[in-house]
Amino acid sequence: MENQNEQIHQMRGLIDTIKRADVAYYRDDRPIMSDRDYDAAVDCLKKLEEKTGVILSDSPTQTVPGEILESLAEVRHTRPMLSADKTKSMDDLVRFAGGRDVVLSWKLDGLTLVLRYSDGKLQQAITRGREGIIGEDVTHTVRTFLNVPLTVPTKEPFEVRGEGVISWENFQKINDALDEPYTHPRNLAAGSVRKLDSEESKKRLLEFIAFDLVTEFPYTLKTEQMDFLAENGFDVVPHLLLLSPNHREVDLAVQEMNPGKFSYPVDGLIMEYNDVAYGKSLGATGHHENRLIALKWKDELFETKFLGVELATTRTGMVSITGLFEPVEMDGATVSRAYLHNYDIFEKFQFGVGDTIQVYKANMIIPQIAENLTRSGTFRLPDTCPCCGEPLVVEETSGGTRQLYCKNPHCAAKLVQKFAHFCEKTRMNIEGLSDTTLEKFIGHGWIRNFGDLYTLDKHRDEIINTEGFGVKSYERLQASIDRSRTCTLAKFIAGLGIPMVGRHAGRIIDRASKGSWELFENAIKDGFDFTILHDFGETMHDNIYKWYADKEEEKLWRPLLDHITFIKTEENATMTNPNNPFAGKTVVATGKLVNYTRDEIQTRLLELGAKPASSVTKNTDYLIVGEKAGSKLVKAHALGIPTLTEEEFEEMAG
């Protein structure tokens, strides 16, 4: 078994390596490994899949097609999916163990599923459904999970029970991009598994963690069942074997399993007899099986004083409400805020500044407000958007709850993508301002235009106290902002988000304007015809003028000019090398180049005084050919256009 587990672990490592290589090659145009090494990794993965009989659902050797259903089919379970008896008492756990060997594991907080296998292949995936008797067929979405084995070495039919979950890390990433955020990974997981469109479900980064072998194979111990599942490629719930534990040993084991250090949401622990036959002999009630018991953590309540709320506007216009209270120590951490999930919850508490409230950490992780003991009802929510100052409205969501919304179409919070575009590495290269961070900063009103990016030091203390930030991350961000204060006109224009005017067009404008913003702006004022520039068409020309005339857009970019110093690009190589063969020539590059990204080869051509182009025509003077060149090379041959390898190009360029 150990060798099998090592091989599956090796497979997971190969899958991760291959995926990272794919992103680097296809998305970033910056290969991190040679084609030879890549092919070797894929071959090694295929051999391991053949040897183990296990193929994981996210394996690059498999492509799971998208599937959209009209509705979910009902399926009867072969064995009722009952719950576990519950307790919050450690004494009950000790009494349950009763001197027998027990297994202690996480009680995962997601959507319970049963997976059926036959002839070594996944046949069906079923939800718990009504009373654990009739479930729903969700095979189409479970096939898109990150880690579900599509094939296994065991050919005999068997069923495995587990939990469909989303890690805390992935939950944060996904939730930040949703129009209506979920309050907990459990809700997101349940909604994602039951989607009719498997492609939509695939985006939710679901995982399956196995905890029970339903089929009665000849295993006498629970730990043997867990080993069987691991050998067949499943991620098995972490667990501890306790041998006839006493009260102290049970207490130590429970303390060891700290939910704050676990990557997935949990709502307790499960204790189960290791002796499978003994557990089965205890039977079941209509609600739970007597072979196991669940320990639910007590929510320890702490009293504190309500201080007010913090509002933040999201890119959808929804305004989140966070309750603020006097700092209190909970589970080893100082907590002073708790998210109030909607307007209805805020109203329910009838807050007033100074009210005595009770707070706790749900499942020992998420700060929550449990009760307002005073209920003075004197606190009123701000009625204007924290970002743009426009009035807020209360609207009912599709889920039936009420939320605060900013309806101003020009609110900066709705322009997160514009700011993210400006900060990209190939534009102004401001590191530390991801979409998520920008949304927080903009939502708090710290960023209302591009110029505000350069005055974030005014909000230093607030930023440092923002979740996910600290002194070091703030200092790194500020250093990156300061570096971007000096830039070329090309990068600046590319970052402004003028429709169809990107990096290539920015470089051309940079050269035409000699690196001067004043010359570029004066050209617009004087009615300059941008179509005379190489690779500029009428649409790009019109877009520049429409963008410049848009007063709302001007409010965003005009303040930038007080913070940016423009630097000149290198003079054209034609100045220093009159024999440069590329001066004034139209040059196209195709295929994968070794020493240049697409952006870098165009920059190099401009430095040589050439005219970079994206398509081959009869006016093309040279075609630079990299690996996997396609139709452009064929067309160049047909037109008799000279072709150059990357080495030949570099030699000619000197």
Image: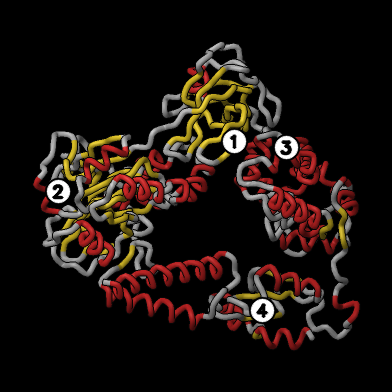
In space, the residues marked 1 and 4 are separated at their CA atoms by: 41 Å
The tag earlier along the polypeptide, 3 or 1, is 1
Answer with left or right where residue 518 lies relative to residue 219. Answer: right
Q: In what quadrant of the picture does the N terminus appear? A: bottom left
Which mark's residue is nearer the viewer, 3 or 4?
Answer: 3
What residue is drawn where x is 53% and y is 41%?
332
| Residue 538 appears in the picture as rendered | no
User: Given contact means CB atoms under 8 Å apart, are the residues at marks 2 and 4 in contact?
Assistant: no
> What is the number of the mark on residue 279?
2
Q: Amino acid at mark 4?
A: Asn
The tag earlier along the polypeptide, 2 or 4, is 2
Rendered image quadrant of residue 571: bottom right
Q: Read off the residue under disc 1.
A: 314
Which of 103 and 476 lies nearest the eye of the viewer? 103
In space, the residues marked 1 and 2 are separated at their CA atoms by: 51 Å
Rendered image quadrant of residue 588: bottom right
Element on which disc 4 rests:
loop
Q: Read off the residue under disc 3.
A: 446
Which of 207 and 75 lies nearest the eye of the viewer? 207
User: Given contact means CB atoms under 8 Å apart, are the residues at marks 2 and 3 in contact?
Assistant: no
The tag earlier along the polypeptide, 1 or 4, is 1
What residue is drawn where x is 25% and y is 65%?
232
